[in-house]
Image: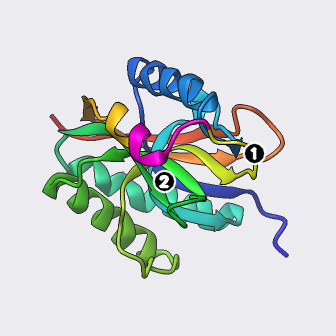
Amino acid sequence: MSTFPHYFIAIPLNHSLKDYFSHWQDSLKEQLSYKVWPDKQDLHITLKFLGPVAPEALKDVTNELKSIEQLKSFETKVGTIGTFGNPLKPRVLWAGVEKTNDLVLLQNQVEEYAGKVGFAKENREYRPHITLAKKWSEGSVNHSLADIKTSYNEKQKLSVDEVVIYQIFPSRSPKYEVVETYYLGK
């Protein structure tokens, strides 16, 4: 087992979107039974999970990702409710992210740059989302997921103008701390 800190690369949300989805979480907590509701400061869109990273490898990926700043900033839409896992007891509840060509290009570039310094390529299809809750609990459910999905369907604009590397601190809340920020071109 590695003792190195864990990291991931993501698109941060602005304060107003963190507030917006935090309100969704507050309302959904009364309707759904999940063990983990991420702190609003931890809400983000993952581009690549790195896992445990040695200091030298972190330096390498940090330097390689500077090339990401050549990409142009763009807009996408976020909102709607979705799930991963068993539809009756889904392991993850998320807010959707519109999978635009610009977003796919950004994610592909992150994969490419991380791969250049030794990080394995993700084999699963990229499914952008904002995790709102995880770890289904066997508690009571006051509403059906189908009803919830129709109630939480408003989309918001997200300007994607920066990418960050987060370090994970499992025993803290918020759990994620920015270690590097990359600004996309205008």
Residue occupying the point 45% across, 77% down: 122
How many residues crowd mark 1 within 10 Å: few (<14), some (14–19), many (20+)?
A: few
Viewport quadrant of the C terminus: top left
Dot 2 corresponds to which residue?
9
Residue occupying the point 17% across, 53% down: 100
Q: Amino acid at mark 2?
A: Ile
Residue occupying the point 30% across, 53% down: 68
Point out the stretch of residues depicted in magenta. 142-148
Quadrant position of residue 107: bottom left
Q: Position of residue 136 (x, y in %)?
A: 68, 53
Dot 1 corresponds to which residue?
139
Is residue 130 visible in the rendered structure shown here?
no
Q: Nearer the viewer, residue 76 or 163?
A: 76
Q: Which mark is residue 105?
A: none
Q: Position of residue 148 (x, y in %)?
A: 43, 38
Foreground label between 1 and 2: 1
Q: Amino acid at mark 1?
A: Gly
Q: Residue 154 magenta-drawn?
A: no
In the picture shown, does residue 90 fall above or below 132?
Answer: below
Q: Residue 143 magenta-drawn?
A: yes
Residue occupying the point 55% across, 31% down: 28
Q: Nearer the viewer, residue 31 or 39?
A: 31
Spatial separation of the CA atoms under disc 1 and disc 2: 33 Å
Viewport quadrant of the N terminus: bottom right
* Horizontal side, residue 15 vs residue 97: left or right: right
Query: Secondary structure under badge 2?
Result: strand
Q: Nearer the viewer, residue 94 or 2?
A: 94
